[in-house]
Amino acid sequence: MAQVVIAILANAGGVGKSTLATHIAYELGERKYKVAMLDLDPQRSLDVFCGLEAGDVASTMANVLSKDFKGDWIFAPAWSEFKVEVCQGHPQLAEVANDLVIRKRGEYVLADRLKKYPLSHDAVILDCPATLGMLNVNALAAASHLLVPIQLEMKAIAGSAELVEWSITTSDELQLEPRPLILGFVPSMYDDRIAMHRQYLKQLPEIAEQLGIKLYPEIRASNEFKNASAHGLPLHKYRPRHPGCKQFKKIVDDLVKLIKANRDK
């Protein structure tokens, strides 16, 4: 079975990557799909968002990317009622990233792991670090699709355009066939009380059209996202009637179409 592998990429921190990863994973779980989240961030963001205890290094992505990995994927269940699982991050991923630079096929280690030791999940979500280093190169090489959250500030918008250029250039350098497709931009942390946010949100459709990239509806800023993550829960479980729960539907609808198309191959 072909697999949908979504890398959530941004070249800045605090733009909502882990919020996006956990909420689309939860909604896919609600729709009865089996989802693996791979935390490539040394800061272990998904541990916080999924309410997980820190894992020892042998049970994390640091082990998966090590030279000694033998296919023993270890996952922690995110929410017991669904088949959503996390291969956790670890601070040692920073050292692993340095090691990948000098290893043969260092850019392709994650892709090689997923090919040699395939996962049974319908979708794999890669929660990436906030720098365009070797871990993100590995995510790019392993991904079938990319999802790019954008904070509504000039620096972030310019950075997202640079990220698109980086993904194209790096894909060419790695000779990726097929090249991962950019599923879309996701405006994040939108606050309509802020004039700058309103201004940039109006400009984004033209920018996305120029780049040939789909623009998803904005994810509105809410302290309830922070409150939910403090409890290790998605908003859907913390405040199921909150309007923010509906903001991920179009992204998940597209992911479901991809999963179904892959099943038919």
Image: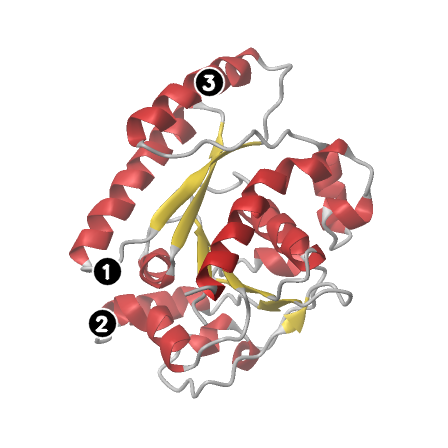
Residue linked to disc 3 = 200
Query: Mark 2 belongs to which amino acid?
Result: Ile
Give the spatial CA distance, label 1 vs label 2.
23 Å
Residue linked to disc 2 = 102
Are the two marked residues, 1 and 3, in contact with CB atoms closer than 8 angstroms?
no
216 over 264 or under it: above or below? above
Give the spatial CA distance, label 3 vs label 2.
41 Å
Residue reaching furthest to the front: 264
Residue 212 visible here? yes
Residue 38 visible here? no
227 over 32 or under it: above or below? above
User: Where in the figure is residue 158, as x and y percent of width and height?
Assistant: 34, 28
Give the spatial CA distance, label 1 vs label 3.
34 Å
213 over 230 or under it: above or below? above
Quadrant that contains the N terminus:
bottom left
> Which secondary structure lies at badge 1?
loop
The answer to which of marks 1 and 2 sits earlier in the sequence is: 2
Q: Nearer the viewer, mark 1 or mark 2?
A: 1
Query: Mark 1 belongs to which amino acid?
Result: Glu
> Which secondary structure lies at badge 2?
helix
Q: Nearer the viewer, mark 3 or mark 2?
A: 3
Q: Tell me the residue at 21%/76% (across/down).
A: 104
Crowdedness near tag 2: few (<14), some (14–19) or many (≥20) residues, C-alpha within 10 Å:
few
